[in-house]
Image (cartoon, helix red, strand yellow):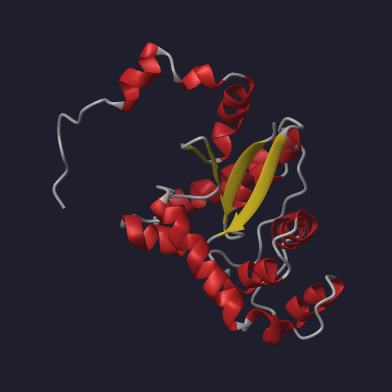
Amino acid sequence: MSRHIDWYFDFISPFAYLQFKHLDQLPDDVELRLVPVLFAGLLGHWEHKGPAEIPAKRVQTYRYCHWLAQRLRVPYRTPPAHPFNPLTVLRLAIALDARRPVVAAIFDYIWGRGGDVDDRAAFATFAASLGVEDVEACIAAPAVKQTLRANTDAAIARGVYGVPTAAIDGELFWGFDTTDLLLDYLADPGVLATPEMQRLAALPSAATRRR
């Protein structure tokens, strides 16, 4: 019997790109569904900032991802401006059914080669390489926009607060740095069922920050 993972992502995230490059490590019996969501929508719902919205964290994140990609030997080049508006690429992925080769091509365009999403001519040329001749009409389709909204709403309802997030069996694995934990869980779900893991899941708060 196959197991099912929903993988929530936004192309704006370099960590999503890096984890995508490691999804081939998943066991053969895992059925993977790629789910494009709007990261800004998650941030707005949970009322917190993205790493690029905190100046010092922004610089460290860019440098760290560059270093990490080199260490992992993953092709990597940060695009000319970041954050960028990811709506065009998210909608393009959805219009093409978020097929894995399509998602891979978009990630490689942005993070593998440092493509400029805001360069309309370059983006149109890239979309044409995926078989989309009129990309503006493609991404403007109401059904495409609605699917992105629905994906984001469904992710929020599931408790997803960041990207990338892998969801399976009611568990959420957020971030590239949980890749090994996800793989361990797939090998043995009991890794999250130990007494200490259960205690941590129910740990009370001793203080609450004022808002």
Q: Position of residue 98 (x, y in %)?
A: 69, 61
Does the rendering let one see residue 72? yes
The image quadrant that residue 195 belongs to is: top left
Q: Residue at x 49, y 66 (%)?
A: 150
Q: Position of residue 108 (x, y in %)?
A: 76, 57
Does the rendering let one see residue 17? no
Q: Position of residue 157 (x, y in %)?
A: 39, 53
Residue positioned most to the front:
1
Q: Is residue 207 left or right of residue 129?
A: left
Q: Is residue 95 above or below residue 60?
A: below
The image quadrant that residue 131 belongs to is: bottom right
Number of labels in the image equals 0
Q: Residue at x 43, y 64 (%)?
A: 41
Q: Is residue 107 above or below residue 96?
A: above
- The quarter of the image holding the N terminus is top right
Q: Is residue 138 above or below residue 177?
A: below
Q: Is residue 134 left or right of residue 37?
A: right
Q: Position of residue 196 (x, y in %)?
A: 37, 14
Q: Residue at x 39, y 55 (%)?
A: 54
Q: Is residue 43 above or below residue 63?
A: below
Residue placed most toward the observer, 94 or 174:
94
